[in-house]
Amino acid sequence: MDNQLNSIVVQDFNQNPVDLLSIYKNQNLLLLLYNNQCLGCTGRAVPLAYKLQNMHKNVTVIGIHSNFGTQTTSEEDIKSIFTSKELPFPIYLDETHEIYDFFQSEGTPQWVLITKDKTIYRSVFGSQANAENRLLYALESLD
């Protein structure tokens, strides 16, 4: 996989294509590739993403829900895991898991840190303490 990216095309909740690198130009991005059915994702990774977003103002956190079956995912499905029924950070859809595959994800959750110059800086699998520490070190090195 080339570390330099040209685009990351996902879908919004209306199934419209969205290029994250165009919308979030000149921003460090922390992508969280996850699935609502993954308990590690909803129980640990999503709260960690929210925490990291608040700790590192120089990074934009974006959730990407990757589907692995034939079902489609609605905005209500995504919001159902949040007690407030509001999104804590932008979340987009990867209906056919193309983005998940592109980043050679090991499973969900998969974290991908992309620098302002559209370069993949780190990719970390998991939501356990070791993954959190690796993410923290990577984020701190961007500050």
Image: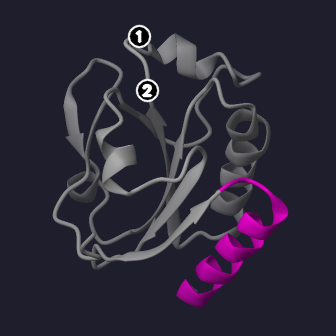
Residue drawn at x 23%, y 39% as measured from the top left: 18
Quarter of the image with the N terminus is bottom left
* Mark 1: secondary structure: loop
Along the line of sight, the residue nearer the viewer: 14 or 97? 97
Crowding near pointer 1: few (<14 within 10 Å), some, many (20+)?
few
Structural distance between the alpha carbons of marks 2 and 1: 8 Å
Residue drawn at x 55%, y 22% as measured from the top left: 78
Residue under circle 2? 67
Q: Is residue 136 magenta?
A: yes
Quarter of the image with the C terminus is bottom right
Residue 95 sits in which quadrant? top left
Along the line of sight, the residue nearer the viewer: 142 or 110? 110
* Mark 2: secondary structure: loop
Residue 17 sits in which quadrant? top left
Q: What numbered label is drawn on residue 71?
A: 1
Q: Is residue 30 left or right of residue 85?
A: left
- Observer able to see residue 115: no
Q: Is residue 98 left or right of residue 34?
A: left
Q: Position of residue 61 (x, y in %)?
A: 53, 55
Residue furthest to the left in view is 6
Residue 80 sits in which quadrant? top right
Disc 2 vs disc 1: Cβ atoms closer than 8 Å?
yes
Colour scheme? one colour
Q: Position of residue 85 (x, y in %)?
A: 66, 19
In the rendered view, tell whether residue 16 sits above or below residue 139.
Answer: above
Q: Position of residue 65 (x, y in %)?
A: 48, 33
In the rendered view, tell whether residue 30 sits above or below residue 8.
Answer: below
Amino acid type shown at disc 2: Asn
Q: Which residues are magenta?
A: 126-142
